[in-house]
Amino acid sequence: MSQQNPTAEAVAEPDRPPGRGDGATRARRPALLSGAVGRNLGLVLALAALCVVGVVTAGDRFASFDNVMTILRLAAVVGVLSIGMTFVITAGGIDLSVGSVMGLATVWASTLATQTMAEDYHWSIVVLTALAVGTAAGLVNGVLIAYGNVVAFMATLAMMVAARGLAEIISGRQTQIVKVDGFLDAFRGDLLGIPVLVWMFFVVAVLGWILLNRTTFGRRTIAVGGNPEASRLAGIKVRRHLMYLYGLAGLTAGIAAVMMLARTTAGSSTHGQLYELDAIAAVVVGGTLLAGGRGTIVGTVLGVLIFMTLTNVFTQNNMSISAQAVTKGVIIVVAVLLQQRFARRSST
Amino acid sequence: MATTKASATPLLQMRGIVKTFPGARALDGVDLVVRAGEVHCLLGQNGAGKSTLIKVLAGAHQPDEGEILVDGEPVTIAHPVAALEHGIATMYQELDVVDGLSVAENVFLGHEVTNAGFTRRREIARRTRALLERLGHGEIPPHREVGRLSAAGKQIVSMARALSRDARVIVMDEPSAVLDSGEVENLFRVVRQLTASGVAIVYISHRLDEIRQIGDRITVLKDGATVATDLAVGDTPTPALIELMTGRAVESTFPARPGVADDAPVLLSVRDLALAGVFSDVSFEVRAGEIVGLAGLVGAGRSEILETVYGARRATSGSVQVEGRRIAPGSVPAAVRAGLGLCPEERKSQGLVLDEPVYRNVTLPSFARFARAGMLDEAAERAAADEQEVALDVRPAGTGRAARTLSGGNQQKVLLGRWLVQGCRVLLLDEPTRGVDVGARAEIYALVRRLADAGDAVVVVSSEIEEVLGLADRVLVVSDGRVVHQGPADQIDEHGVLDLVMEGSVA
């Protein structure tokens, strides 16, 4: 961390009389203001402002239930990828391959062979194939990074290129239509009036939140991201944990592939292009530190929703994709600048 | 005219400096008077405001009140370059040299000698050589990459940089912390040369013996204010200084040694341990209740021995046994399971997750124990950490605060508490009092002794021979990767250790 911390010495006052209760409350107050709640509040306000813009410019077309569900359904795929990405980035890593791996998983799970097997036995074979392909690719990343000492950026860049290529080879660059009815029935419908895809995003986000904030796995992730050497010397198996983390990112790519197959009813080697960048942007805008050591699932979800709502508002107003891209860029920069200011304030 | 003025007016004066940060008054009326050609020592515990004061001098912070005078003229130091323009250079504890650049490039970093945008490499090499010679280190080649120099060499580069800016006041923040005793001697020689040529040094150190050797006058800070200034080093006894710094009298620093029973069980047994190219044939035992110290120069292999025993480095050969059970080589998790715990040399980079709360730092090796089926029980975790916080008297209290906000001594206590929660039997302490102030040192010594008395085995590595001899029951002297002496700590003195070290390095 390169942020200056001018008062670290001043705050530590070994000479002051103990005053235990006093010290404890003083420690907690700034945590509330500049902590998770405060940061997420900013994101909620930004999202609310976007919605206001949407209502003002597009009226009922924006504010309808169907449109909200459209936003959520589109957010779901990138959202699931972003949950996995949150873990990797919290641990101080990066995964550029999730978009490609997702594309590869859609192709592999929709080949003639897979579909025939699914018709013969059970539609869940499509799901299991996608999850297995995603997880396997993630574990390859993990082994290279953790045990091969390849820099995460390069290992996952290589996977990004290679997985896309493999998807093209397998599919022969053809779109593979999914005809397994059981699969389509299971994932394309609604549950309690809300699309199954949105439920899946919700469940993955909740599980991700629990995993990051309430389990030993999450604690290890934060510790490894905050100080890998201290974690190692405390007896944490840092390498193994890193491998699991990239495996987890791969698993979310597999889940995203299932959702993508359901949404588009087709597997394609072009699925998920640039999704990794959308995921990274959502994670960082959400407040997870790119340097590692701090991660927030709620922030990531809000980040994903902000970007998707933005896209929707632009589309509703028939504005160009290019203008969207410029706005996205500006949002990323503003968010990162604001974060730095918060970080500086909370460290004093 | 400047010379007549300099003799009458102090080179640098600071009067009534106040600096407030949100929620903390870091400086609360600091006075400092530095004369040309003196070594002015700045003393104070961690948190007394020394770092903030240095940053004000370096232009990194703006004071809220008070004035700074250079040659009797009031000046404002608005930014770091302004400090250099007024002749004030700062050497930070973490030396700010760029490892990838050459010595000459580092010296002229930020004020490169250029010709139409092209650097004049030969010219800066020539000037660098002249500066290095002035510092008595003409043997450092200006084109050498700084990353290949030792810590002492980097310090010389940092000093040459200050001189290249025509610095008249050089602030040195714990310059000896990264040096061994031979290198410290050399540093002192350079400091004396600088002061002889009229440069003033503001010298910050926790080691009072150094201040006795090199200092002229002393200013003591406490709680952000000057409590004593203009003390002549020769006339001020150490207890008086400690009392000024801590506000209380500190009696004997080292706790009494109760002695180790002959039938005390051997907890740690190291046999023929070797790490290729670093050390070999290291064998020793530590009994329950015993503190064993490893003494030797920096680079002799002391830290490496500790880290290899702990499994953080994989031994080339030899074995480590804890309570008679051999532990797998090169595996920290195995060592921790067997009951070993390491408090590493670099607390901040190797020990703590600085932005995480104290309680999570305390439970870093043991948090899995507070979990059922992978789900953490943070309440139990905090309770365990709170218990250690009280037992070890970590201040300020509150295990929810970030570890970053604690002083060095209290961070060390957090690391000790970590292994107490884990329930380890053999504690390995690497430089346990580095960057820890005088008052807190005595507390840490007492704590370590209390742990030994409670039946733990302790191994201590320290660059300060006095500390090893004062704290340990038994001493191993390490030189050039070999143990050259083992024996009771009270049967050898500092000279004896140094003799052994010198012999060892000659042989």
Image (tube, coloured by chain):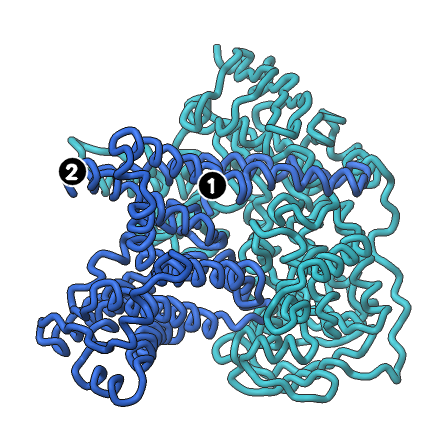
Chain colours: A blue, B cyan
* Badge 2 vs badge 1, beta-carbon distance below 8 Å: no
Q: Would you identify the image quadrant in which residue B267 lies?
A: bottom right
Going by the numbered disc 2, the residue's amino acid type is Asn
Of the 4 image quadrants, the one containing the C terminus of chain B is bottom right
Q: Is A108 positioned to the left or the right of B340 in the image?
A: left
Q: Nearer the viewer, mark 2 or mark 1?
A: 2
Horizontal and vertical percent position of residue A59: 28, 33
Of all chains, the one bearing label 1 is A
Up-down relation of residue B500 to residue B113 (above or below)? below
Residue A215 visible, this angle? yes
User: In the image, B110: left or right of A221?
Assistant: left
**Residue A116 sits in which quadrant?**
bottom left
Q: Residue at x 35, y 32 (%)?
A: A52
Residue B83, image x, y percentages = 46, 25
Disc 1 marks a residue whose amino acid type is Gln
Q: Residues within 10 Å of mark 2 (few under 14, many from 20)?
A: few
**Residue A78: percent from left, percent from top:** 31, 57
Instruction: Give the number of the disc on residue A173.
Output: none
Instruction: Give the residue number, with chain letter if any, for mark 2.
Output: A318
Label 2 lies in what chain? A
Q: In the picture provided, is B503 more to the left or to the right than B148?
A: right
Residue A32 horizontal/vertical position (percent): 60, 40
Q: CA distance from mark 2 to mark 1?
A: 42 Å
Q: Residue furthest front?
A: A193
Q: Indicate which disc, 2 or 1, sits on the residue closer to the N terminus.
A: 1
| Figure check: B299 above or below B305 | above
Q: Mark 1 falls on what kind of element?
A: loop
Please give the name of the residue rendered at 63% of the width and 78% of the height, measured from the top-left corner.
B335
**Residue B505 at least partly seen:** no
What residue is shown with label 1?
A: A3
Q: Which element carries disc 2, helix, strand or loop?
A: loop
